Amino acid sequence: MGTDLTVKNFNLDDSTGEIEFEEADITHREKIFSIIKKFKPDQVYHLAAQSSVSHSWEDPVETFRINVFGGINILEGLKIFCPECRILMACTAEEYGETDIPDKPVDEQFRIFPQNPYAISKSALDFLSSVYYGAYKLPVFISRAFNHIGPGQSERFVCSDFARQIALTESGKQEPEIWVGNIQSERDFLDVRDAVKAYYFIINKGRPGQVYNVCSGRKLKISDLLDMLISFSKRSDIKVKIDRKKLRAIDVKSMYGDNSKLKNHTGWIPGYSIETSLKDTLDYWRGKTG
């Protein structure tokens, strides 16, 4: 995931246990078609995307090129060469936009009202995926993921950004200051390891053509997550400062999801606490910056 255009395809040779990797830009139609034709996969997890909301404001054209046209290349390739392949299309809760009922979790029947270029691009892919299921019976499964968190995440995402700055402060490479954007928003954060498990459950136990929220079902204020991260720090003198460049043109105030459909259809249950996720993220950046 992220702004990298690379899609990684692998094939496991059952006789040798070896995995064959092949890399390609998902916007290169002929290459994607050749890979699908060569591997004839049983399952595809489509996670390659330009997934940064802030970057989508900076370059909406690139965001659409990658997320929409790249996704179409995969759908078309599967339709032509591998129509029985089960495919997970990783979309986003950003599609829902602002809710009129901030104290109620959003379920999959909630209306779509995207409010940034990234969310609009993913809404297009979401709808296209449903159309390919309806028109061609391509076994598509659609996830609408809320915020992910965990070790290895890019610093372009809020909690990873905070953790990185704290790690830099601890190592003496940054002043004891954390630069933030809007930290009053409320979001639903799920550990990436639970998200990966959810994707597996959806494509193997879910129902084709269905949309599934991938979320914790709990809303947390970003300022509270920052406070938790600071409490885990080895420094006690960290100050929080506003960086206006980190503020978005439009920022949804509150958003959290209902994961009951995912649980009922697949039996998925999350296993990581928010405290564990934050500690592991901080430890990851300590290892990178120390």
Image: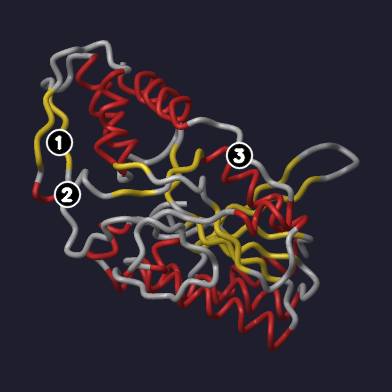
Q: Earlier in the sequence, mark 2 or mark 1?
A: 1
Number of the label disc, if any, that sits on residue 179: 1
Density class for disc 2 (Cα within 10 Å; few <14, some 14-19, many ≥20) is some
Q: Give the amino acid type for the residue marked by disc 2 in the picture.
A: Lys
Q: Image height check: is 239 above or below 93?
A: above
Tell me the quarter of the picture where residue 160 sits: top left
Q: Is residue 69 left or right of residue 269?
A: left
Dot 2: element: helix
Q: Position of residue 19 (x, y in %)?
A: 73, 42
User: Observer-nearest residue: 60 or 196?
Assistant: 196
User: Observer-nearest residue: 68 or 227?
Assistant: 227
Q: Give the amino acid type for the residue marked by disc 1 in the picture.
A: Trp
Q: Image height check: is 14 above or below 73?
A: above
Dot 1: element: strand
Q: Earlier in the sequence, mark 1 or mark 3?
A: 1
Q: Give the amino acid type for the residue marked by disc 3 in the picture.
A: Pro
Q: Residue at x 65, y 43 (%)?
A: 197
Q: Position of residue 198 (x, y in %)?
A: 64, 48
Q: Position of residue 239 (x, y in %)?
A: 11, 25
| Quadrant occupied by the C terminus | top left
Does the residue at mark 2 contact the one at mark 1 (Cβ under 8 Å)? Answer: yes
Number of the label disc, if any, that sits on residue 246: 2
